[in-house]
């Protein structure tokens, strides 16, 4: 029962799901002239998150550091890194329009969600503590990029229709068959290492 709960919970950080959601957010922002600067900031920050996650996985799979121990560092958690990027960036865009209490509740919810996703990766024995810490650092780097790049950009107001569209996008992406980016990276590493 506990494993089933964590399996469901870990899907909220699914990189493919969040990639589609991130694309949806970008297209929504890009759709209006007054939000284009914010769309560029979103694309840059989320792109940095994706790039660092894939590069980290690729390099660490090549190095195979501490492979047999609980402190292995073979692959930063894409669920945690991309989840931190997506949910954190979304909160950073929405928070400025909220009151102090609503902003505190939003950030508390985001931190709780990301903590639970990270715990799910550990409980399911899919990642080690160092891999989770590295993933949070990658997500944090993308948030820092957003802070710097979007310093003078207006926050975005989401209407009911936009929130419904985002929920539908999440539902559609969630229902899609799972495609593992990790498997693709491992295949590339094996081909690179096995090349004479």
Image (spheres, helix red, strand yellow):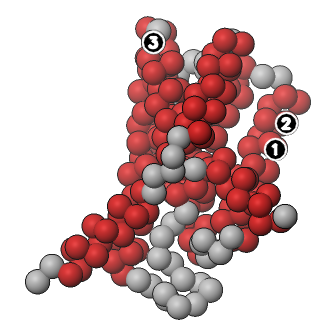
Q: CA distance from mark 2 to mark 3?
A: 29 Å
- Residue depicted at 79% across the width and 35% down the height: 106
Residue placed most toward the observer, 173 or 58 = 173
Kindly state the secondary structure of the residue where label 3 is placed: loop
Residue placed most toward the observer, 20 or 138 = 20
Would residue 4 appear left or right of 45 to someone viewing this image? right
Which residue is the site of mark 2? 105
In this rendering, the answer to whether 130 lies above or below 188 is below
Which residue is the site of mark 3? 31
For the C terminus, the image quarter is bottom left
Q: Earlier in the sequence, mark 3 or mark 1?
A: 3
For the N terminus, the image quarter is bottom right
Identify the mark at residue 3; answer none if there is no mark.
Answer: none
Which residue is the site of mark 1? 108
Residue 145 % position (x, y): 48, 42
Camera-side mark, 2 or 3 = 3
Toward which corner of the image does residue 191 lie, by quadrant? bottom left
In this rendering, the answer to whether 70 lies above or below 52 is below
Q: CA distance from mark 3 to mark 1?
A: 30 Å
Residue 177 % position (x, y): 51, 46
Residue placed most toward the observer, 155 or 66 = 66
CB within 8 Å, label 2 to label 1: yes
């Amino acid at each position: 029962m506990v494993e089933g709960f964590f399996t469901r919970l870990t899907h909220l950080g699914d990189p493919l799901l969040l990639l589609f959601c991130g694309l949806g957010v970008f297209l929504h922002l890009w759709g209006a002239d007054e939000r284009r600067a914010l769309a560029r900031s979103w694309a840059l920050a989320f792109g940095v998150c994706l790039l660092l996650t894939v590069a980290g996985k690729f390099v660490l799979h090549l190095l195979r550091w501490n492979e047999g121990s609980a402190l292995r560092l073979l692959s930063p958690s894409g669920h945690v890194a991309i989840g931190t990027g997506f949910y954190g960036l979304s909160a950073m865009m929405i928070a400025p329009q909220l009151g102090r209490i609503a902003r505190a509740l939003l950030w508390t919810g985001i931190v709780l969600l990301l903590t639970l996703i990270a715990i799910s990766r550990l409980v399911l024995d899919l990642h080690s503590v160092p891999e989770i810490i590295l993933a949070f650092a990658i997500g944090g780097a993308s948030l820092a990029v957003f802070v710097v790049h979007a310093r003078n950009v207006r926050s975005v107001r989401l209407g009911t229709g936009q929130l419904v569209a985002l929920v539908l996008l999440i539902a559609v992406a969630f229902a899609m068959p799972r495609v593992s980016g990790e498997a693709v990276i491992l295949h590339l590493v094996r081909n690179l290492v096995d090349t004479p």
